[in-house]
Image: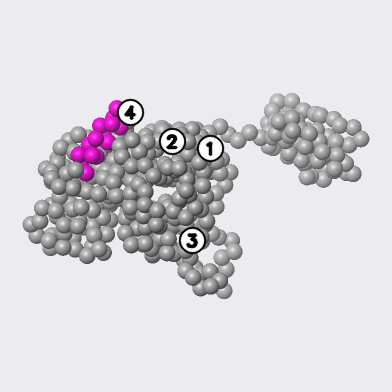
Amino acid sequence: MRTYSRVTPEGARDILFEECRGRREVQRRLTWAFTLRGYREVMTPGIEYYDVFSLPGAALPQREMYKTTDNRGRLIVFRPDSTLPIARMAASRLQGQQKPLRLYYNQSIYRIRTYLSGRSDESAQMGVELMGAGGLGADLEGVSLAAQALEGCAPDFRMELGHAGIFRVLADQLPVSPEQKEELRATIEAKNYAALEELLEPLGENPAAEAIRRLPRLFGGEEALEEAARYCSGGEAGEMLCYLRTVYTALQKLGLGDRLMVDLGLVQRNDYYTGIVFSAYVPHHGVAVLMGGRYDGLCEKFGEPMPAVGFAVDVDACALLLENGMEEEPAPAVLVYGEPGFEAEAENAVSLLTRQGRLCELSLFETLEQAEGYARDRGIPRLVLVGRQVTEMEIKRKGANP
């Protein structure tokens, strides 16, 4: 019988040494960026009731969720998203707090990814949720904070800006089922022109269908907005396009002009987005390292109506970008070896040295010669010998001239 005691589950992996350092450094930088803007940390449980993620109009695909049951047979899932649980928290635990709520989180999500997608099922994320504030000011805070936070971890990024409501309004004008709408959304997000054409062809001559056909091709600068106006010139879609232009112009004034582009095909997979949506990309990484947007109707589903905007950062993707520029982890400056019978004194010497701020290790070898060889191999320059006396000696590096 095959056992799996030496491997990780599909979609999961071990994280070692430099990757851990990179992850912690990204978390440190993002935490600093968020707290400087007045955001406070919250955490939600790693397991939640399935109901949190199956609300009408905000449901996640159940095929992507890891599911189990509690001791009463109720269906629970490993957290597949952070925004929905934080909306639940805000409605149940923070309704008496003064608005707006500025919250940030640092936690993993668990989603069953498609085979060979190249993405882990367990993803470390950090993000913010600005709840209880609508309008241009809040949207600008969300997007500009995302750019500021990402600049500290991945300076060479570009950001795409869209509006989830435009697709929603156009799709509502089509004679299609909710399932077909989600198919359209997925093909637009993937910029799969052939599949999109196949879905729209049966609808014939339909202005909304023609507009949706053009959405994934509408990206760039002002010219994309100008072309989009030909298809979304009136009604609710026209108002949304006008607002998108306002946000785009304001972000250019904030210095994001050379990093920012409009993408009307940015419709986001999560159905709860209602307004401005944005993503960020870095070279040599095929998927977005940051995703976010406005979700004004989500908190109402938990009984506490309020507008909100937020984003999430892929911590591990940013950590990989940092690794090449990080200094090599320093070796200990001191190795402490205790002679037989002086083990407690050696441990005490380590404690004293670390309190002084010196990076040191306790030797667990049986002989002094073994300890010296280990120090030489690791490049540890000093060895402290603890016995009846305490002696500090220099260790020459391996391969150094005598």
* Foreground of the two, 70 or 126: 70
Instruction: State the image coordinates of residue 396 (x, y, percent, origin top left).
Output: 73, 29
Of the two numbered discs 2 and 4 on the same chain, state the one appearing first in sequence.
2
* Quarter of the figure with the C terminus: top right
Residue lying at 37% horizontally and 46% vertically, measured from the top left: 308
Of the two numbered discs 4 and 1 on the same chain, state the one appearing first in sequence.
1
Q: Which mark is residue 20?
A: none
Q: Residues within 10 Å of mark 1 (few under 14, many from 20)?
A: few
Calculate the distance from the C-alpha at mark 3 to the C-alpha at mark 4.
Answer: 39 Å
Q: Residues within 10 Å of mark 3 (few under 14, many from 20)?
A: some
Of the two numbered discs 2 and 3 on the same chain, state the one appearing first in sequence.
3
Calculate the distance from the C-alpha at mark 1 to the C-alpha at mark 2.
Answer: 11 Å
Of the two numbered discs 3 and 1 on the same chain, state the one appearing first in sequence.
1
Calculate the distance from the C-alpha at mark 3 to the C-alpha at mark 1.
Answer: 27 Å
- Tell me if residue 241 is in the magenta stretch: yes
Residue lying at 50% horizontally and 41% vertically, measured from the top left: 40
Q: As drawn, is 194 to the left or to the right of 315?
A: left
- Disc 1 secondary structure class: helix
Q: Which residue is mark 4?
A: 254
Calculate the distance from the C-alpha at mark 2 to the C-alpha at mark 4.
Answer: 15 Å
Q: Which mark is residue 48?
A: 3
Prevailing SS of the magenta stretch: helix
Name the kind of residue labelled 4 in the image.
Leu
* Foreground of the two, 359 or 369: 359
Calculate the distance from the C-alpha at mark 2 to the C-alpha at mark 3.
Answer: 28 Å
Of circles 2 and 4, the one toward us is: 4
Instruction: State the image coordinates of residue 29 (x, y, percent, origin top left).
Output: 50, 35
